[in-house]
Image: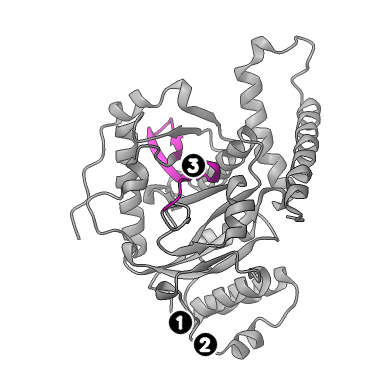
C-alpha cells in the first residue's frame, strides 16, 4: 500500500472550477455540480483521484496506489468527471466518472474500450442497440468526511446531489436512454450475505438475453444453494423481497451496499448482467447493471429535472420572454413538456430497434 498523496491546495481547485464547467446548482444542500476532465482541470482530477483512493481504501477495495487515476481518466479523449462541490466548506463531496457510449472506441476484437471491458464482454446486440444510447458510469465515491452526519444536510444529500447531475446529463443529451454501470460488494461481506444480494438482483432483474456477461475467468458464481436463497426471499413482489433481503443481511451484521440501495430506491426496473472480480481493486466484486432512464420513479425524475430547469432558466433569464412567470406552476408545465418530448423521441429510438425498453 502506497502512502496517499496530500490534498491538492484549494486555491488550485477553485481556479479550475470556472462557470463554463458548471452543470447546475443542486436541488438540496446548496451545493454545485461541475463536469471536468484531466485535460482542462488537472488539479481537480488529481484531487478526485486522491479522494477516490481514500474512500475506496476505507471500504476495503482500493488500487493501493498513492492516487486512484488510470488511463481512462487521462487518455486522449478521457472519461469526464461529474463532481459535487461544497462552496461553503470548499471541498469536493463526491463524484462519478462517465463516458457516453456513442463516444466509445473499439478494440481489434470489436469490443468497446470501456472501463468495464476488462471484466465484461458485450454482445453484438448490446453494441448495436444499447451502447449508442447509454452512459457508462463508474468510480462513484462520496468523500469520507461526507459519509457521516457531521456535515449535516451536506452529507445527507450527497447521493441526491449526484442524481441531480446524472439527470442533467441526460437532459443535455436527448439520445441517452440508459445508465450502465457497476455496483460493488467488498470482501468484508460474508458469502451468504453476498449471495443473498446477488440472488435478489438476479431473481428480479436478471438479463436472460445475455446482452452482457462477465469474462469466464473473472465470473463470480454464488456458493450458496439457490433453493435456500428462495426460502429466504420467497416473495414474488420486488419491494417485499427487498424488505426480506435487508432484514436477512442485517441479521448477519451488514447492510445492503449503499449503491445497490440507491439504485433500487430509484427504479423498479433494471437489468443485472452478472458479477465479476475486479483484480485491479483488491478483488472487490462488481455487478454490471443497466437502468432505463424513463423507468426511474416519476417523482424522483421530476425532482431532478426541476433542479436543472431552475438553473437553466436563471442562467438564461435575460434571453427568455419577459412574460414567462417564474412560478412552481410554470416549472411543472416545463417538466411535463420536456417529458412529453422525450417520450416521443424514446419511442422513435426503440421502434428502430424493435424493443420496449
Q: Nearer the viewer, residue 201 or 124?
A: 124
Query: Few, some or many C-alpha atoms within 10 Å of disc 3 (few <14, some 14-19, many ≥20)?
Result: many
- For the residues labelled 1 and 2, say whether their Cβ atoms are less than 8 Å apart: yes
- The residue where tag 3 is placed is 154
SS of the residue under disc 3? helix
Whole-percent x, y for residue 33 in the image: 50, 34
The answer to whether 110 appears left or right of 208 in the picture is left
Whole-percent x, y for residue 312 in the image: 63, 24
Q: For the residues marked 3 and 1, what is the alpha-carbon distance in whole angstroms?
A: 34 Å
- For the residues labelled 3 and 2, say whether their Cβ atoms are less than 8 Å apart: no
Quarter of the image with the C terminus is bottom right
Q: Quadrant of residue 39?
A: top left
Q: Is residue 105 magenta?
A: yes
- The residue segment tinted magenta is 81-107
SS of the residue under disc 2? loop
Q: Nearer the viewer, residue 148 or 220?
A: 220
Residue lying at 65% horizontally and 14% vertically, measured from the top left: 317
Q: For the residues marked 3 and 2, what is the alpha-carbon distance in whole angstroms?
A: 39 Å
SS of the residue under disc 1? helix
Residue lying at 69% horizontally and 47% vertically, measured from the top left: 300
User: Residue 191's mark?
Assistant: 1
- The residue where tag 2 is placed is 224
Question: Looking at the image, is 305 positioned above or below residue 185?
Answer: above
Q: Nearer the viewer, residue 14 or 117?
A: 117
First along the sequence among labels 3 and 1: 3
Residue lying at 75% horizontally and 28% vertically, measured from the top left: 331
First along the sequence among labels 1 and 2: 1
The answer to whether 140 appears left or right of 51 in the picture is right
Between circles 3 and 2, the one closer to the viewer is: 2
Residue lying at 50% horizontally and 50% vertically, measured from the top left: 137
Amino acid at each position: 500500500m502506497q502512502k496517499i498523496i496530500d490534498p491538492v491546495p484549494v486555491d488550485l481547485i477553485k481556479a479550475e472550477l470556472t462557470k463554463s464547467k458548471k452543470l447546475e446548482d443542486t436541488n438540496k444542500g446548496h451545493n454545485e455540480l461541475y463536469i471536468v476532465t484531466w485535460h482542462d482541470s488537472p488539479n481537480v482530477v488529481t484531487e478526485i483521484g486522491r479522494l477516490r483512493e481514500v474512500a475506496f481504501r476505507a471500504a476495503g477495495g482500493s488500487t493501493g496506489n498513492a492516487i486512484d487515476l488510470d488511463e481512462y481518466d487521462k487518455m486522449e479523449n478521457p472519461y469526464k468527471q461529474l463532481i459535487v462541490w461544497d462552496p461553503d466548506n470548499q471541498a469536493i463531496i463526491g463524484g462519478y466518472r462517465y463516458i457516453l457510449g456513442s463516444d466509445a472506441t473499439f478494440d481489434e476484437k470489436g469490443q468497446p474500450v470501456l472501463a468495464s471491458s476488462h471484466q465484461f464482454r458485450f454482445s453484438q446486440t448490446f453494441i448495436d442497440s444499447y451502447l449508442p444510447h447509454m452512459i457508462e458510469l463508474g468510480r462513484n465515491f462520496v468523500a469520507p468526511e461526507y459519509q457521516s452526519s457531521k456535515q449535516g444536510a451536506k452529507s445527507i444529500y450527497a447521493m441526491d446531489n449526484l442524481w441531480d447531475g446524472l439527470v442533467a446529463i441526460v437532459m443535455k443529451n436527448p439520445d441517452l436512454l440508459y445508465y450502465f454501470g457497476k455496483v460493488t460488494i467488498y470482501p468484508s461481506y460474508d458469502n451468504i450475505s453476498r449471495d443473498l444480494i446477488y440472488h435478489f438482483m438476479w431473481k428480479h432483474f436478471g438479463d436472460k438475453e445475455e446482452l452482457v456477461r462477465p469474462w469466464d475467468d473473472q465470473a463470480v458464481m454464488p456458493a450458496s444453494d439457490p433453493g435456500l436463497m428462495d426460502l429466504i426471499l420467497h416473495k414474488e413482489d420486488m419491494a417485499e423481497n427487498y424488505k426480506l433481503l435487508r432484514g436477512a443481511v442485517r441479521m448477519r451484521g451488514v447492510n445492503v451496499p449503499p449503491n445497490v440501495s440507491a439504485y433500487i430506491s430509484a427504479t423498479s426496473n433494471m437489468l443485472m448482467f452478472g458479477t465479476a472480480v475486479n483484480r485491479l481493486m483488491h478483488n472487490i466484486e462488481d455487478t454490471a447493471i443497466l437502468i432505463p432512464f424513463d423507468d426511474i420513479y416519476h417523482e424522483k425524475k421530476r425532482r431532478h429535472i426541476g433542479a436543472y430547469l431552475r438553473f437553466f432558466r436563471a442562467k438564461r433569464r435575460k434571453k427568455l420572454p419577459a412574460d414567462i412567470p417564474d412560478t412552481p406552476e410554470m416549472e411543472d408545465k416545463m417538466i411535463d413538456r420536456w417529458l412529453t418530448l422525450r417520450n416521443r423521441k424514446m419511442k422513435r429510438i426503440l421502434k428502430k430497434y424493435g424493443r420496449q425498453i
